[in-house]
Image: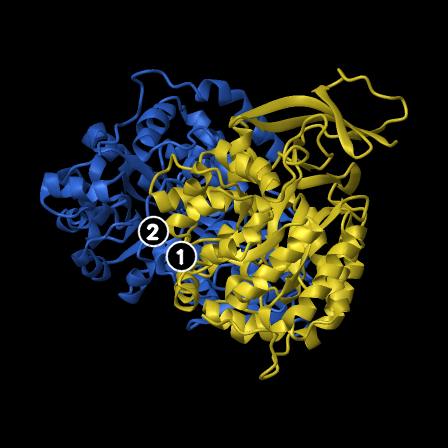
Chain colours: A yellow, B blue
Amino acid sequence: MQTLLIEGCDLLTVENGNVRFLPHQDILIEGTYIKAIGPTGSLSVPKEATRLSAQGLLAIPGLINTHAHVPMVLFRGLAEDVTIESWFNDYIFPLESNLTPEDVYWGALLGLAEMIEAGITYVADHYFFMDEVAQAVSEAGLRANLVWAVFGHEGEQKLARTVEFVKRWQGTAEGRITTWLGPHAPYTTTPDFLRLCAHYARDLDVGIHIHVSETAAQVAHSHQLYGMSPVRVLLESGVLEVPTLLAHCLYPEEEDYKILADHPTGIAHAPKTYLKLGMGTAPVSRFRSVGIPVGLATDGAVSNNTLDILEQMRLLALTQKDAAHDSTVMPIAEVLAMAFLDGARVVRQDGVLGALKPGFLADIALLRQDRLAMFPRYNPVANLIYSASAQDVDTVICNGQVLMQNRRLLTLDRERIKEEVQRRLERLNQRVPGRRIATYPV
Amino acid sequence: MQTLLIEGCDLLTVENGNVRFLPHQDILIEGTYIKAIGPTGSLSVPKEATRLSAQGLLAIPGLINTHAHVPMVLFRGLAEDVTIESWFNDYIFPLESNLTPEDVYWGALLGLAEMIEAGITYVADHYFFMDEVAQAVSEAGLRANLVWAVFGHEGEQKLARTVEFVKRWQGTAEGRITTWLGPHAPYTTTPDFLRLCAHYARDLDVGIHIHVSETAAQVAHSHQLYGMSPVRVLLESGVLEVPTLLAHCLYPEEEDYKILADHPTGIAHAPKTYLKLGMGTAPVSRFRSVGIPVGLATDGAVSNNTLDILEQMRLLALTQKDAAHDSTVMPIAEVLAMAFLDGARVVRQDGVLGALKPGFLADIALLRQDRLAMFPRYNPVANLIYSASAQDVDTVICNGQVLMQNRRLLTLDRERIKEEVQRRLERLNQRVPGRRIATYPV
């Protein structure tokens, strides 16, 4: 079994809501797990261990991206300053009709590389041509929960094919890949279709990852069609009986809190997307107060522009303080608890991910702390949240394997990926009248 | 006269609200001014010109920070998650009572270095011990408008000393330093004190830089004391007869728009501070619609944590879209116009700063565009606003002098500054009961 010693780092942990910043620590990794952590020089280390000097670096749990459409990096910058309806109908859905499986593969590699460079070691991805995304994840070395997005109009046969995808990839890539089902949203499916999804998910013993209640208009639309909120549609169709990852959920109704709290749910929260599309702010504190975990997410790069969880941490703090008109809301410890522990809960990996401690999987990001914007270091945790950027990430480890060291990607060929993507761009950015993968109805 | 040729860069200009992105340009600098701009290889260049290869870099006007308290980087991270009243009374004012002139000098150098690394070439700074700040600006090589902050309780003698500061430093450092007067705010002075400031400013032919209407409570307080808004206090005390830079102004009253539009005013807007302190959002579009220029600002690092105008550009777009619940508000072209041209108008440098064109001062930031988060490059301007970070700034030129090249500071000794600051930290972070420089009254 491979042994790796990370030497001399600072280390950040959150336990019971308390942040602990421990200077000068060693982390011993055996195989894919953290074996021991202690003050520098204090651990008993096998002679054959590989040593990785981390003097001055800050070790945090590998960041968890609870909702993304990774290959959409292919369209970064193509839909700026437009309404959400136009964003879907004039840009995203027509552009996505251009995609081939091979495009998605290279787009996935590009997005995964960006995420590794930003310290992300886990992504819950919701897209299509997911065999290619799974292949890319397998090569990139990070961890992912993958779902093949399916719209109601694509029919039951298509849904059945996404079930085959679940079976094909479940537990592959040394266990780094898990697979769930991914009906797109209540507003792009029907209750019967969702019922069938829930049936399949129970049979497969997997969860469901779905967009829900993103706008007030969607909620009103649901009431018109079904006489109930989108969350209740999920309840009544049986979806919430399986683990359910709800993307966004900005507009829960009063009864939705209890419904979600009574079921195995978690919410993916992507504040940069909400700001940029003028969608409003999710009631994060209320969700948390009733026990619904909320993790951080980047969404796709066409709304968010970057795949950067550190930026989402900063924007989580800033937007929640702003919405409450109260600077004491969402303090540093809560931001960390959400990013680390709740992120792990949302993707059902609590107990193995989201903290640096013995027995947890060895998913670790190491950040430089020497920039002027992070000096003085009275409060290195405030520096992490309010000053650090993705470019401060120096080294990234996932499942015990070093994916990036000293900002050099070890599993992926950065320039090759850029070249392959570049070749495809001219074809990909065409919007052919009438061609689109779906219609946004609200 | 020194001649510098920047070769092969991309170049961003905004004219009449239109953004132009010009690839493969050369910029010829003669002395302190831009002499000519044209496609690579097209300019007639003197043999003795120094050549600076900028292949792949994006040239933008040196960024303008319209309101800061630069030396407050010394206290970065010391006042997190507290109310605005506590922020002033329990943290900032007590901490500032520890400062010596020499502390301010080293703090200024630290903050100026951070700003150069972030592409900022102009700062309007509002602090005290300003001789030391001026000395630091002189050495650092960037451009600054400096005011010595004065509270009403410090009295007329102290105000007279800030007048001496204005005279001492006006036009120094090869013309890079201008000086104005800096009464702290209407809520920390009196109308009579402000009247005296206005009198001095007229005599000196300089402007006034002042905080105003930061919170709704301050406006209510002003009505209680004086029966009018803080903006009207400025009007009636004669302040607005001279060029006035208003920091923040989040809570203008209806009549304030006309008052400000009818006078030589400009507003400094620092969205990260407003989010973090839960202060609300300024009516930026309304100000602009009546012709009041609004520039971007970092405020001090104890509220903002970083001195980063690129981040403020991004947050300007995001917060204005959010406040309007409309993703089409504050489009990319408007963000650039505010950061570049309006920033220059706010500090009264329009016509010489805020654009890259012949006859303008040679203040230029050159940014790398090769990060994965800035790829593909369908829309390099969207990448600049939504993906770029201060760390993408590669080279900075101010007044024709290269201040940073390939991320190496040429005028300042980064490590020396950190060491000198580090030596002072333990003394600086003490809060002695009863010791403070002022009291926040509202």
Would residue A103 be seen by someone viewing this image from the given angle?
Answer: yes
What residue appears at the point 42 percent right and 30 percent down from the top-left corner?
B79
User: Which residue of the protein is positioned furthest toward the right in this rendering?
Assistant: A48
| Few, some or many residues within 10 Å of mark 2 (<14, 14–19, 20+) | many
Q: How many marks?
A: 2
Q: Mark 2 touching mark 1, by CB under 8 A?
A: yes
The vertical placement of A170 against A53, above or below, is below
Whole-angstrom CA distance, mark 2 to mark 1, is 10 Å
Choose the circle earlier in sequence order: 2 or 1: 2
Of residues A118 and B201, the one drawn nearer to the viewer in this rendering: A118
Would residue A109 be seen by someone viewing this image from the given angle?
Answer: no
Decide if residue B47 is on the left or right side of residue B292. right
The vertical placement of A182 against A388, above or below, is below
- Estimate the x, y position of residue A216 in percent, counting from the top left: 40, 60
SS label for mark 2? loop
Give the labeled residue for mark 2: B281
Residue B322, label in figure: 1
- Estimate the x, y position of residue B157 in percent, counting from the top left: 21, 30
Identify the subunit bearing mark 2.
B
What residue appears at the point 70 percent right and 52 percent down from the top-left corner?
A204
Q: Name the quadrant containing residue A23.
A: top right
Is disc 2 in the same subunit as disc 1? yes
- Closer to the observer: label 2 or label 1? 1
Q: Name the quadrant containing residue A149.
A: bottom right
Quadrant of the snapshot with the N terminus of chain B: bottom right
The vertical placement of A163 against B161, above or below, is below
- Amino acid on which disc 1 is placed: Asp
Residue A284, label in figure: none
User: Which residue of the protein is positioned furthest toward the bottom in this rendering?
Assistant: A433
- Amino acid on which disc 2 is placed: Thr
Of residues A23 and A112, the one drawn nearer to the viewer in this rendering: A112
